[in-house]
C-alpha cells in the first residue's frame, strides 16, 4: 500500500491538480479516476459565476457625469494671499 507522500508524488507526476486537503482515500480515488474532485468542480463553478457577475456589472455600470457638471471652486478661493 502506497503512503500519502507516494500518492502525492504520483499525482504530481501525472499533472493532476487539487491534491491539497485530501486524505489518503481521496488521493487514491483521484489517482484511480484521474480527474479533479468535487472541491475542484465547485471552484470551477464559482469562477464561472463570478465571471458572469463581472459581465453584468460592466453592462449595468452607470455613466459618470461629464466634468462640466461637477462643481468647481472659484479661482479667487484657490489663490493664496
Image (cartoon, rainbow, N blue to C red):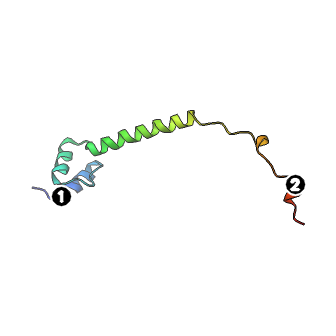
Residue 3 visible within the image: yes
Is mark 2 in CB contact (under 8 Å) with mark 1? no
Q: Nearer the viewer, residue 76 or 63?
A: 76
Q: Which residue is mark 2?
A: 75
**Residue at the limit of the structure toward the left, as seen here:** 1
**Residue drawn at 18 percent across, 58 percent down:** 4
**Residue drawn at 20 percent across, 41 percent down:** 33
**Residue drawn at 15 percent across, 50 percent down:** 25
**Residue at the limit of the structure toward the bottom, as seen here:** 81
Q: What x and y, as percent, mark residue 16? A: 28, 47
Camera-side mark, 2 or 1:
2
Q: Nearer the viewer, residue 17 or 52?
A: 52
Q: Is residue 22 left or right of residue 57?
A: left
Give residue 39's quadrant in the image.
top left
Q: Which residue is mark 1?
A: 4
Q: Nearer the viewer, residue 3 or 69?
A: 69
Amino acid at each position: 500500500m502506497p503512503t500519502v507522500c507516494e500518492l502525492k508524488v504520483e499525482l504530481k507526476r501525472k499533472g493532476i491538480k487539487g491534491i491539497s486537503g485530501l486524505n489518503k482515500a481521496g488521493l487514491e480515488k483521484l489517482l484511480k479516476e484521474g480527474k479533479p474532485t468535487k472541491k475542484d468542480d465547485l471552484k470551477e463553478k464559482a469562477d464561472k459565476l463570478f465571471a458572469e457577475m463581472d459581465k453584468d456589472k460592466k453592462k449595468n455600470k452607470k455613466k459618470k457625469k461629464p466634468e462640466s457638471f461637477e462643481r468647481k471652486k472659484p479661482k479667487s478661493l484657490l489663490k493664496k494671499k
